[in-house]
Image (spheres, rainbow, N blue to C red):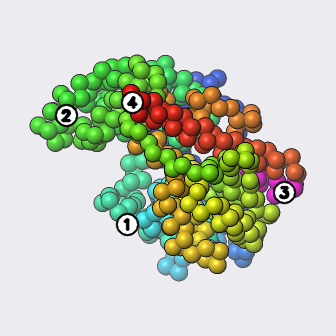
Amino acid sequence: MYITASKLYDYLQCPHFIWREAYGPQEEKIKEINPFIQMLWNKGIQHEEKVIKEIGEFTDISKGSFEERFARTIKAMEDNTPLIYQGVLYSGNLFGIPDLLKKMPDGSYVPIDIKSGSGLDNGNGKPKKHYAVQLCLYAELLQKLGFKNNRQGIVFDIHKNEVEYHLEESINNGNDISCWEFYQEIKKQTQLLLDNKIQNKPAMAGACKLCPWYNSCKKWCKENQDLTMIFYLGRTKRDAINEELEIEKVDAFSKLDTKEVIRKKKQNKNFLKSIGEKTLSKLVARAKILNDTKKPVIYDKVDFPQASHELFFDIEDDPTQEFVYLHGVYERSKTGEKFIPFVADGDTNKAEATAWQNFWNYIKSLPQDDFAIYYYSPHEKNTYQRMQRQYPEIISAEDVDNFFSNPRVIDLYQIVLKYTDWPLSSYSLKELAMYLGFKWRDDTPSGALSIEWYNKYLETKDEKILNRILLYNEDDCKATMVLKDAIYKLSAEYNAN
Ligand code: SF4
């Protein structure tokens, strides 16, 4: 089996995926492609087509069998063709199709990938690992085939930037290894998994929900009582506990003598190094709740503000375009309950800004100091800070900061983390609200699918699709209300005891 750019990407998304694809129970794999994933593919293809249209002259090698395309690619490079589109490269166990191959003045060829994301990591401005390893693969192929490459690659990104990747440079701030060394390690692991020389375990993680193996891996994790069923206990911690404590199952972990482990940690700083004392105690407490108590727990009373107007709010946005298309509010007051949506009437900046302006006008119309706003996760705050930079005429940075630092504006997720634990593997709003008996009216409620629906709505202007989005968002807001009420009740019970 060849190592390809997409296999390297898959390995970085999930180290288990490669093995499961090759040797997993195929009958358990979800066959239908998730519409959100399909939408991302389509957008990627559209973006590539757009870039290619504007790029000027090139030699197109996108048609024909791989053998024919390979022969034509080699010939084109031998003929010093300045720009080659969709050339095929293979050698030994490596196979790659860089979007473009560009002849440089020094005679070398540089692989170029067209990406529908930012060229560098937004967090640290360093190379993106999954872009770097793919460019390394093409660079190695060029060298193996006898063409000059200075361990360089280029990414044409979504913002029309031409981002150079110097593959001998460090892959990230906290790590001394270069992109090239990182690639060699990822390539080695991928090969071992493809050859079934090593096997690794599934793990329940955020990325799993969109994966075709989700049901299969979840079943495995449940049957095996895998430790990643414990909220916040991910693959790295699981592997460390498996290895150093020789504990594989939630049941055994829930009975762990944490004092003894902490004593050992104090004696030997390298023992269970990746898990701090506090985290260990917290994870064991969660294992107990999951395995034994099977009930939510509150650790202290929570003081929610008294208010005549309670608002439960949630946004819907398309991160692939950094576009917010809906600000939904479910309002509860003495006069009753109602859903108030602020929808962008199209995918233009003007439409996005108008919806946001309307949202702020509504907030300003609330009785001063007599409202409370609940939302779930830092996403709303981060998105509003980004929007403020884009639309400073609507609201100042200071006002956005003041809004979110107002004690009446509450991120319920932080309350969940600080004060409670639940007999669940995930503390997502959906899992918690469903545990509390709330039901979404949509058959397949999902934020990712809502993005796909919105894109379809833009294409078709079908009001039924818009209504589906509104219904879904209203239910998200109501779920936030159900969760707030449940925590309020738990807190009252805690107070009474
Ligand atoms: S479901 Fe999760 S663990 Fe399983 S292959 Fe997919 S991403 Fe990996």
Of tags 1 and 3, which is closer to the observer?
A: 3
Q: Residues within 10 Å of mark 4 (few under 14, many from 20)?
A: many
Can residue 89 be seen in this snapshot? Answer: no
Q: Earlier in the sequence, mark 2 or mark 3?
A: 2
**Real-space CA distance between mark 2 and mark 1, rounded to the nearest whole angstrom:** 39 Å
Regarding mark 1 in the picture, which secondary structure is present there?
Answer: loop
Q: Which residue is mark 3?
A: 459
Amino acid at circle 4: Arg
Q: Could you say whether the residue bearing mark 2 is in a helix, strand or loop?
A: helix
Position of the N terminus, as image quadrant, is top right
Residue at screen point 17% across, 37% down:
265
Viewer-closest of 29 and 248: 248
For residue 192, what is the image quadrant?
top left
In the rendering, which numbered label is found on residue 262?
Answer: 2
Q: Amino acid at mark 3?
A: Glu
Q: Residues within 10 Å of mark 1 (few under 14, many from 20)?
A: some
Relative vertical location of residue 21 with respect to residue 398 in this rendering, above or below: above
Q: Is mark 4 within 8 Å of ligand 1?
A: no
Q: Where is mark 1, residue-wise?
A: 169
Q: Amino acid at mark 1?
A: Glu
Tell me where the magenta segment starts and ends, as one range: 451-461
Q: Is residue 126 part of the magenta span, yes or no?
A: no
Residue at mark 4: 286
Q: CA distance from mark 3 to mark 4?
A: 45 Å
Residue sitting nearer the eye, 342 or 239: 342
Q: Earlier in the sequence, mark 1 or mark 4?
A: 1
Instruction: Name the N-terminal-most of marks 2 and 1.
Output: 1
Residue at image position (63%, 39%) is 479
Q: Position of residue 316 (x, y in %)?
A: 67, 53
Q: Is the C terminus in the top left, top right, bottom left or bottom right quadrant?
A: top left
